[in-house]
Amino acid sequence: MKSLLFFALSLLIIFQINAQPYQLEGDFGSGWSPHILESRGAVLGVTVQATATNATNGFLFNNPSTNYTPKWCGSNAPNVSRPVNTLHTGGAYYYNGGGWDANLEVPVTASNYYTFIIDDNSTSNNDLSILETTYNPNDITNVTVPGSVNDLQVGRLGSQQIPCLAF
């Protein structure tokens, strides 16, 4: 009996671990397809490039088993629109059944890049941000600080570039 209880608890724990958002699914101009989220510390994220312009581009976040239960989506209230460059607190709704789900929507422009950042809560709504840029974001892998932080200078940035440092 103990081994059966241990096995059941283990399965429950494994299910909860795999229940966090794992991939972004959406049609960004070349058909509905998955984009695996990468760990970025306390959040998950992925960048995709739109190949077509769409004012109501559909997307959602799914678990690794692709069975859509659970998933993180909008609601049929309707509450699906997610403008870019905004923090949507609790904006990716945790859905585990009930028929109220709907795909989230974001306006996209062909050739622009969209970085999706989502919390990694496994059984609740997740905060969501979608950052839009006209260029492919780059990772900063090495920073040299001359003297002190007060001496740090940032070179000329493009009109849509915003410096962001994380320690």
Image (cartoon, rainbow, N blue to C red):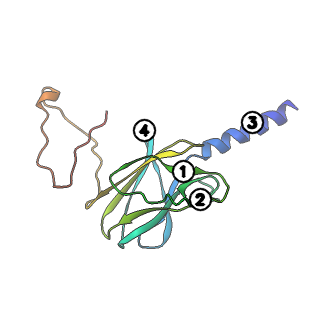
The residue at which mark 2 appears reads as 101
Query: Which label is found at residue 9?
Result: 3
Number of residues whose C-alpha sits closer than 10 Å to that of mark 1, classed few (under 14), some (14–19) or many (20 or more): many
| Sequence order check, earlier mark of 4 and 2 | 4
The residue to which callout 1 is attached is: 93
Task: Write down the residue under mark 4.
Answer: 41
Give the structural element (helix, strand or loop) at label 4: loop
Given the current orientation, which residue lies at the most extreme front position? 77
- Is 58 drawn above or below residue 131 in the view shown? below
Amino acid under disc 3: Leu
Quarter of image, res 149: top left
Q: Is residue 152 left or right of residue 120?
A: left
Q: Amino acid at mark 4?
A: Gly
Q: Earlier in the sequence, mark 4 or mark 1?
A: 4
Residue at 35% of width from left, 50% of height from top?
A: 86
Where in the figure is residue 61, as x and y percent of width and height?
52, 55
For marks 1 and 2, the one nearer the N-term is: 1
Q: Is the C-beta separation of discs 1 and 2 under 8 Å?
A: yes
Q: Residue furthest top?
A: 148
Task: Select label 4 or label 1 by which is in front.
Answer: 1
SS at circle 1: strand
Q: Residue at x 50, y 45 (%)?
A: 126
- Quadrant showing the N terminus: top right
Instruction: Name above or below for residue 164 compared with residue 133.
Output: above
CB atoms of marks 4 and 2 within 8 Å: no
CA gap between label 4 and label 2 equals 28 Å
Q: Are marks 4 and 3 in contact (CB under 8 Å)?
A: no
- What crowding class fits label 4: few (fewer than 14 Cα within 10 Å), some (14-19), or many (20 or more)? few
Mark 3 or mark 2, which has the lower sequence index?
3
Expressed as whole percent of the image width and height from the top left, the position of residue 107 reads 37, 65
